[in-house]
Amino acid sequence: MRGIILIATFALLAATTVKAEDWAIDAHWKNPSDLARIAPLFQHLKVDRKHHTVSLIADDAQLAELGRLGIAYGVDMAKTANMRTFYAQAFERVRGSGIPGYSCYRTVEETYASMDQLAAAHPTLAQVIDIGPTWERTQNASAGYQMRVLRIGNSATDLAIPNKPNMVVFSSIHAREYAPAEVNTHFAEWLLDNYGSDPEATWLVDHENFHLILQANPDGRKKAESGLLWRKNTNTASASCGDDSGIDLNRNFPFHWGIVPGQGGSSTYICDQTYRGPSAMSEPETNALVAYVAGTCTDAGVCTGGVFPDLRDGPLHPTNVNGDGGDAAPSDYPGMFLDMHSYANLVLWSWGDRSSAAPNGPALQTFGRRLAWFNGYSPEQSDTLYPTDGTTDDSFYGSLGVPAYTFELDIEFFEPCAPLLAKTIPDNLAALRYAARSLHAPYLLPAGPDVTRIEASPDLVAAGTPIALTARIDDSQFNQSNGAEPIQNISSAQAFVDGLPWEGSLPVASLAAGDGAFDSPAEEVSASIASGALGSGRHLLFVQGTDASTQAGTPNAVFVDVAEASDIANLVGTITARGDATPLATNLRVTNTSTGESRSGRSSGIDGSYSRPMLAGTVDIHVDAPPGYLSEDVSGVSLTGANTTTRDIALFHACTVFADDVESGSNGWSSQPPWVRSQAATGNSSYVWATPNYGNDLDSSLLRTIDLTGYADSTLAFDDRCDTERNWDFGHVEYSVNNGSWTSLYQCSGRTSWQHNRIDLPSNTDNVGNLRLRFRLTSDSNTTRPGGWAIDNIVVESGGSQCRASQNDRIFDNGFEQEVVR
């Protein structure tokens, strides 16, 4: 903030034609006590500690309350308009067919259908469990929902691997937070759909159990799907407060419930956003979730019958926050709890109701900083945002001792699909996968190094053929933006076959440092693994590293298959450019059409050659498209055991549909001030499109229409320098098809260096005659940067029938359609 606009200014805004529903504002706070007074009024506070501002979404009543409290604020009109447009577009639909324009989000019914489909497709790996009714169903058996858990784990390995660690993940317990449920559902799909083909997904499902509550507040979510900014459950028995009705489920959990009233921890006023309910666990949703995760808990804090063991002492209801007793959970506690929310870009851990560190605070912090490295969020103890009580993470850590975290995802309650799919989901899947790799001992393993890469070559061998095992071990992957974790040199790495060290497996090899010495926080390591003692079939080779503090870290694994030499065929060839035969380095995947066996390979950039051992049979080949080329698929290649089959593949060049180096005038672009062609951009002496000395409260676009008729599989490439006020002023790349709504492709803020960007355009741009592209700069109400956003070398490349036809539309040149078997 952003310039401060006081209450009188708001009255003027409300009198305009803008509908006064919800406003995007920046409130100014002077000290932590201001935050504590603001917190009960709102769901989330995105706090800027440098500028002493907090970004909020507020309605008229909340704005009036801020005025009563003497809190100055500014209304961000550009963000307010964007938010309202977004919601209007999102909810102009006929209910029952998803969310048109935002197909990346599933409704409650669609989420439940996905759970059922996953369980039906993987009956030995997944099951759907009903754990109790929602509030509406307790009032009417034909209304509301059953609370549901998707439980994932390989039941066939239960006897061989007893006492598997558990991971419980809640999402969207606050109804208007859409992204968490999608991240959680994608995690379930990653685990199950990749089982058997991806070694990491396979060993996690074999060795651990996952309990995913995808929609933790389905009644409230259904309200939100009607277009309301609904947060709580839908219990209106005591009072109706319009959109603010219900109980905040994440203030209704039992541990320390209501222990910091009047300080922002929760509210006793039924219409407040953080209303905690009349008593702890007053709501059927909370009861069902606690019973499943913790079981039955006494006032003394002794819990039995839940997913997690109770390994920490501490009463549920002390008279104040200092009455906990201070007992720590054992350092080898197995398992983890996570609750995903949006929005604030945070990784949070206990305590939330006091500023003192939890008994396991140092280990919680270490694990949190590891997790935050993957999703890029700020790692913080929960109370640093604002105090909370009766929350999920404090309840399960406090009553059980399980490491418990909250993720605050993304940038909006209802994030556009493009950034959700391109960044929020992938980044948080990486964090969830790391968490899963740490489940055996989350208080210990994150202090050790992670296995960030592992490969075996060859991964299909005849018995007796040595296997070259390589890996990268890295101790440095902490988010150090909020304090620093110690980083140690790697001291050793061990390999294990078909089991983990804590399951009794003995190491089969010590891996050597690639440079001859273990003297760095990140090391490339390798070993030769004898395959003679391995039986026929698929095996998992695990690697675990240890650092100089003697702490072992998280392991990972790779598949190796052993077969008879007479059953192994070799597929070889070259991948080159069509026409000029330029060698291409790219990835390929070969899939046996009968067995489903799928293996990856890579061609050489020197001569384009590749070699891929496969079990004999008929295979399909998919070649990924390197930049400037089109991907290719070849079907029905016959492989014979103990023989080599040669298959050379030539890739089509991608067609340049549009290119602009900004040197030749406006070139069809429509520009709003302050967009100009400029030669004054730092780091680039040529002409660029730029927004130098941009102003406040800006929403300005550079726009062009491109004809993609006959083209498909398009990419957008451009260079940019995004010298804006970091985290406040943004560059957006967006597209629209057939004059429809705008969809985000890219966002930048606060980067002073130039970078090259290459973005795959979504499939709904295929064969579109009037694709609109725009580069849009938005700024808030205060503080700018003189450089602004600069764009150069804008290129759209495409494939599709038109592109292939222009290159004679033949897949193979020079007899490439012939197979050679020898």
Image (spheres, rainbow, N blue to C red):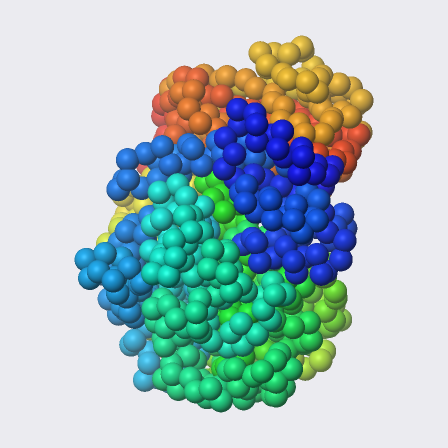
Q: Is residue 765 left or right of residue 675?
A: left
Q: Is residue 297 above or below residue 562?
A: below
- Residue 288 place in picture, x, y as percent: 34, 71
At x 72% / y 60%, what residue is drawn? 32
> Residue 213 occupies which quadrant of the picture?
bottom left
Looking at the rendered image, the quarter that the N terminus falls into is top right
Q: Is residue 677 above or below residue 412?
A: above
- Residue 146 place in picture, x, y as percent: 27, 63
Q: Is residue 375 above or below residue 468?
A: above
At x 65% / y 73%, what residue is drawn? 354
- Residue 548 place in picture, x, y as percent: 72, 78
> Residue 731 occupies which quadrant of the picture?
top right
| In front of the other: 354 or 755 | 354
| In front of the other: 385 or 40 | 40
Count up the numbered dots. 0
| In front of the other: 338 or 797 | 338
Q: Is residue 134 visible?
A: yes
- Residue 296 place in picture, x, y as percent: 38, 83
At x 31% / y 41%, what residue is drawn? 98
